């Protein structure tokens, strides 16, 4: 009897630990579709895990593991093109991704609240960067020379990306 009670207690503890490693997604403009979650290594250089999550009415759950925080890039196909949403996954903390693919928010813990406030400080640079990327895609699809566009749009895009990365590093420190 003690073994059964001990087994049940341990199972409950492990289940509660695992339940804290969830990212719940509630995107109002996605519907019944799938998203691709790319979890990056801690140094942000490589892909650690790639998983497709099926959403029902824009809702789904992604379970993650690990002892270190990870950045996840969530790819969503929309009528306006492919969108990439960035979410920081923190072990032991749930997070909730809500809103739309163009205006999303991540909440769930004190860290996510603080990080969301930080994201608001770089939102203008992100919007400009995303606008340049959409302009690039549109012009390439219209038949303009890709190399010429890289030379024209690339420096502005790289500058914005560098500024965003610099602010991220400053926030982390």
Image: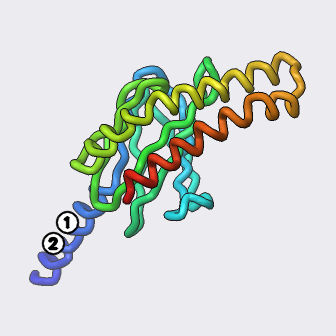
Vertical comparison of 138 with 54: above or below: above
What residue appears at the point 58 percent right and 37 percent down from the top-left corner? Answer: 160
**Residue at image location 15% in from the left, 79% down from the top:** 6
User: Dot 2: within a 10 Å radius of its alpha carbon, few (fewer than 14), some, or many (20 or more) residues?
Assistant: few
**x and y, in percent, of residue 141 in the image:** 81, 21
Q: In the rendered view of the protein, which quadrant contains the C terminus?
A: bottom left
Residue at 71%, 36% in the rendered image: 155
The residue to which callout 1 is attached is 12
Colour scheme shown? rainbow
Residue drawn at x 22%, y 48% as measured from the top left: 110
- Can residue 57 be seen from the camera position used here? no
Q: Which mark is residue 9?
A: 2
Dot 1 alpha-carbon crowd within 10 angstroms: few under 14, some 14 to 19, many 20 or more: few
Query: For residue 13, what is the image quadrant?
Result: bottom left
- Answer whether labels 1 and 2 touch (C-beta < 8 Å): yes
Quadrant for the N terminus in the image = bottom left
Disc 2, SS: helix
| Front residue (pair 57, 119) | 119
Could you say which quadrant of the image residue 52 lies in?
A: top right
Label 1's element?
helix
Percent x, y for residue 95? 31, 45
Q: Is residue 14 above or below residue 148?
A: below
Q: CA distance from mark 1 to mark 2?
A: 5 Å
- Residue 169 image point, x, y percent: 45, 54
The answer to whether 100 appears left or right of 130 in the picture is: left
Q: Nearer the viewer, residue 106 or 117?
A: 117
Q: Quadrant of residue 148?
A: top right
Q: Is residue 136 left or right of residue 121?
A: right
Work out whether residue 42 or residue 8 is closer to the camera in this orientation and state it.
42
The answer, for residue 82, to whether it is visible in the render is yes
The one of 138 and 31 positioned closer to us in this rendering: 138
């Amino acid at each position: 009897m003690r073994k059964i009670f001990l087994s049940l207690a341990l199972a409950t503890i492990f289940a509660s630990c695992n339940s804290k490693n969830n990212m719940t997604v509630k995107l109002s403009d996605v519907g019944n579709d799938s998203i691709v979650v790319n979890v990056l290594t801690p140094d942000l250089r490589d892909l650690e895990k790639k998983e497709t999550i099926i959403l029902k009415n824009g809702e789904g759950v992604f379970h993650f593991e690990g002892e270190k925080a990870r950045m996840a890039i969530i790819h969503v196909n929309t009528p306006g093109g492919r969108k990439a949403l960035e979410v920081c996954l923190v072990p032991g903390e749930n997070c909730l991704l809500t809103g739309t693919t163009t205006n999303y928010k991540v909440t769930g813990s004190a860290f996510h609240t603080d990080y969301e406030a930080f994201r608001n400080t770089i939102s203008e640079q992100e919007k400009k960067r995303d606008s340049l990327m959409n302009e690039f895609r549109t012009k390439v699809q219209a038949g303009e020379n890709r190399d010429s566009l890289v030379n024209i749009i690339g420096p502005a895009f790289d500058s914005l990306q560098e500024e965003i990365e610099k602010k991220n590093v400053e926030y982390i420190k």
